[in-house]
Amino acid sequence: MVTMKQIANRAGVSISTVSLVLNNRDIGRVSPDVAERVRDIAAELGYLTNRLASGLRTSSTRTIGFLSDEVATTPFAGRMIEGAQDAARMPAFFDKHPDVDGFFCFNDTRAWAIYTEATRRGLIIGKDIAVVGVDNHQVVAEALDPPLSTVELPHYEMGYWAVGKLVSLIEGEAPDPFPRAGYPVEKVQPPPLSEQSPQLECQLHIKQSWVRPRSQR
């Protein structure tokens, strides 16, 4: 295994300099010529960073974890459970709110459940009640009859911004919106939402499931 010491000896620099370069912390600390020479030698020798050892030494894994509450046993298990829950709830909701004339659902699969129960009760989507979903899930939105009005979220941009923001926090380039509280535990007030979140554009796709409220007809 190639070590930083071998690279340092070959490049004629210190081990700490090699460490700065190979851990991408050389800007402003190591001259560009030296940094390029170190990287060239590391590539020539086939150096591979030992992330485990580096993490133990710096107390930083430089790894971002992604957590999801989706059921992972099968790709469709989570949706099946959602469908079962919706089927159990929808009849009671319609019974309790017989005069409702519109639904704004937080995703398109929830809108599907509204379609099912409304149809069972003889209601016409787009005439008797309006239904709008969120996600613009192509399989759902276009398969429903009538086609579902839905809000398309900029999922790619949301993920891109989130990781960029997280990296800037890790690197100390942006203030931490949730500073660590001391002891005893202190309440931490995050900055206003408008100051910590970008304004990402959403698109509303209006289809036949949309109908004006009764008060506006």
Image (cartoon, rainbow, N blue to C red):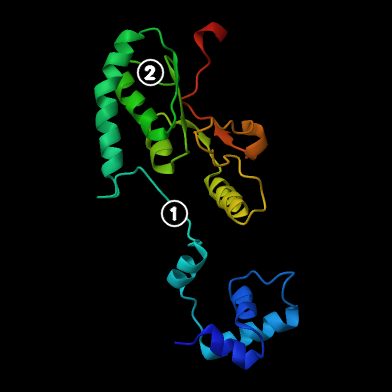
Residue 123: x and y in percent read 35, 15
Query: Which residue type carries mark 1?
Result: Gly
Q: Give x and y (percent) for residue 159.
A: 53, 49
Disc 2 marks which residue? 124
Q: Residues within 10 Å of mark 1 (few under 14, many from 20)?
A: few
Residue 120, compared with residue 43, is above or below; it is above
Q: Name the amino acid type tagged 2.
A: Ile
Q: Does the CB distance between marks 1 and 2 fall below 8 Å?
A: no
Q: Nearer the viewer, residue 106 or 215?
A: 106
Q: Quadrant of residue 193?
A: top right
Q: Secondary structure at mark 1?
A: loop
Between discs 1 and 2, the one toward the N terminus:
1
Q: Could you tell me which residue is drawn at 59 percent across and 30 percent down?
A: 189
Q: CA distance from mark 1 to mark 2?
A: 45 Å
Q: Nearer the viewer, residue 211 or 82?
A: 82
Q: Does dot 2 land on a helix, a strand or a loop?
A: loop
Relative horizontal placement of residue 111, taking residue 40 as reference (left or right): left
- Image: 182 above or below 116: below
Left or right of 200, for residue 29: right
Viewport quadrant of the N terminus? bottom left
As rendered, which of 60 and 134 lies closer to the eye?
A: 60
> What residue does disc 1 label?
65
Q: Residue at x 54, y 6 (%)?
A: 215
Q: Is residue 43 visible?
A: no
Residue 3: where, in percent of width, then height? 50, 85
**Which residue is more in the foreground, 165 or 97?**
165
